[in-house]
Amino acid sequence: MVTITDISKACGVSRATVSKALNGAPDVSQDTAKRVRETAKKLGYLPNATARALKVGRSYNIGILFSDTTGGGISHEYFSQILESVKAEAERLGYDITFISKDLGAMSMDYYEHAKYRSCDGVVIASADFTDPAIIRLATSEIPTVTLDYTFDSRTSILSDNVKGMEELVHFVYEKGHRKIAFIHGENTSVTQKRLVSFRKTCAALGIEIPPEYICPARYHDPKSSGLATRELLALSDRPTCIFYPDDLSFLGGLSELDRHDISIPEEMSVVGYDGIPLSQVLRPKLTTYRQGAERMGREAARLLVEEIESPDLWLPQQITVEGELLPGKTVRDLPDN
Amino acid sequence: MVTITDISKACGVSRATVSKALNGAPDVSQDTAKRVRETAKKLGYLPNATARALKVGRSYNIGILFSDTTGGGISHEYFSQILESVKAEAERLGYDITFISKDLGAMSMDYYEHAKYRSCDGVVIASADFTDPAIIRLATSEIPTVTLDYTFDSRTSILSDNVKGMEELVHFVYEKGHRKIAFIHGENTSVTQKRLVSFRKTCAALGIEIPPEYICPARYHDPKSSGLATRELLALSDRPTCIFYPDDLSFLGGLSELDRHDISIPEEMSVVGYDGIPLSQVLRPKLTTYRQGAERMGREAARLLVEEIESPDLWLPQQITVEGELLPGKTVRDLPDN
DNA sequence: AAAACTTACTTAATCGATTTCGATACTTGG
DNA sequence: CCAAGTATCGAAATCGATTAAGTAAGTTTT
């Protein structure tokens, strides 16, 4: 391994001078700076991020956290898109990305400890159970963090615009003539609450009455539970004409349940998803859904986190809401009369 | 930040003793070892991975490389499954995972330099253009690496069993009565060659003649190009009865092309995918495909890499082939007579 | 021409942990 | 009772890089 010591010997200057030359310090003559850079290149010198991090207390490494429990794993497209865009933006800004998890090998660590252990400059909390004490500890610690789809105290967060998403979807089906709209929702999280409130509010504003049995609990990303909820809705004497699913993937559970009852989409039942993952657009019929701006969310998360890391003094926490986009699809039928 | 110095002061012993006590060295008395561990816990001590890495020359950090160019990005389910299982196994073994990329911020680095810069103990090359000189440099360097779906010289690699996969798929459609089988293949990579040769070999063994125009080039994970290939196949005077697609996602391109010609699956055309991603199993009709053992591949990759890192002396490179599993689906029709 | 700056380096401490080589005290064997 | 062995601990070097402080020239000011 080539170190600054090797360069200093080859150039006949001190290690301090080499370091300063390579970092563009002002008190190095043009001549020596050039000589140092050239021999550095000739010898194939690479800075050692570890040594630098130890000395300057900054690792240029940010953690990313996907908690394994909530099923919001990396392989869901929404999250893998976020991961990809966080990674791209962080790298653009000179930061590497390391996964933060509970328990590394034999050591039992919580998230906070893991982040400290790796001396991460900051952490993006991408998917997590926000009631988990370990998550809370990290998110309220002195380590800069950005959370996605949740705000701790009033710390920095990137929020998908669930209110607007629901509004647009409700308006869309309303204009197609639907009045009997059922809503299958995911676990009781802040996201769910926002969507549910927005759903109710928008319906109310449009003068639609939603009977309580039209609101069904299920779980995110779990086709089975949405299938069950669908079955209950179909058992009602007064069936809805349109069903909102918690997310695109969950709709697939509803799909097979509707299949079982020989109910065709959208002729006999209209459906709406959420997320706008690529899968939704290759289904036939194409799913009506709301695409969350995952790519931009990841980018903003990385950008804000690095801003906070690099200028902590003039930093104010902020919450950014990223709008999505309605994808019309073909799964909502035009009702001739209501 | 609590360091071993703090502990040493609190305990009235030297830093050396603290370090040894925490690492279970033999020349520390039971008493002091216990006292040190207790005050370490009391003070909330966390080892500093950076400092340790600098001293011992091991970072307990392994790199993972997904090259962005080939479209084999993280958000493809095959790769995100691999990522997830590499991550899980590495963490189980006490290693963290960092993404390795070209160009970090302003610095221009190739993959090898990036891995050195972060002093990765090893790198999993999960998805890459194996003709890229930067990839070759890394994969043939002194850094332990494991490649997926490609073998450099005879270094360690994890291979999906493409030969067996093709064999099984061909046999499957053969037994359904198909004799006119077309094969749309991806870019000319070693994987493609294996599949192509295996396809040809199996057909020959079964006495099936495949006319050259039944073999169409396209690109992996690119529905558009497979759509075009499909169009060409449909234009033939002697159409095939069954089409093999390069992967599940590409099949979707074929799907819309078949739609356009009002050809229904499997009644008028049978199709077969490859990969067995979850999407393939929620399509209707369910896709006949071959699931690659992504989860096991990732796990083995991490396991072998760590083995090589931890006992480089008694290490022999090896290639592991991971079998997959045929998913029958519903997209291959039973031909009454052939 | 003496005082006051500049410029261009070097010295040495430091980050947090590990590890080699002693050093000391105590135990055991002969 | 002395030599040898054992158990326990500490001093100091080290990993590679950064940086405050100091130094020795040369340059400018008055």
Image (spheres, coloured by chain):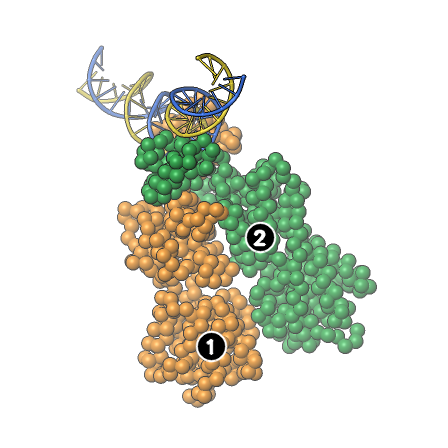
Chain colours: A green, B orange, C yellow, D blue
Circle number at residue B229: 1
Chain identity of mark 1: B
Does residue B64 appear to the left or right of A125 in the view shown?
Answer: left
**Residue at the image point whose x is 55% and y is 76% from the top:** B256
Observer able to see residue A97: no
Q: Position of residue B16 (x, y in %)?
A: 39, 27
**Quadrant that contains the C terminus of chain A:** bottom right
**Residue at the image point whose x is 73% and y is 68% from the top:** A173
Secondary element at tag 1: helix
Three-letter amino acid code at disc 1? Ala
Does residue A202 appear to the left or right of A246 in the view shown?
Answer: right
Circle number at residue A298: 2
Local crowd size for mark 2, using a 10 Å CA cut-off: few (<14), some (14–19), many (≥20): many
Secondary element at tag 2: helix
**Residue at the image point whose x is 40% and y is 84% from the top:** B179
Is residue B87 positioned above or below B226 on the image? above
**Quadrant that contains the N terminus of chain A:** top left
Three-letter amino acid code at disc 2? Gly
B204 and B43: which one is in front?
Answer: B204
Q: Quadrant of residue B189?
A: bottom left
B291 and B128: which one is in front?
Answer: B128
**Residue at the image point whose x is 67% and y is 64% from the top:** A326
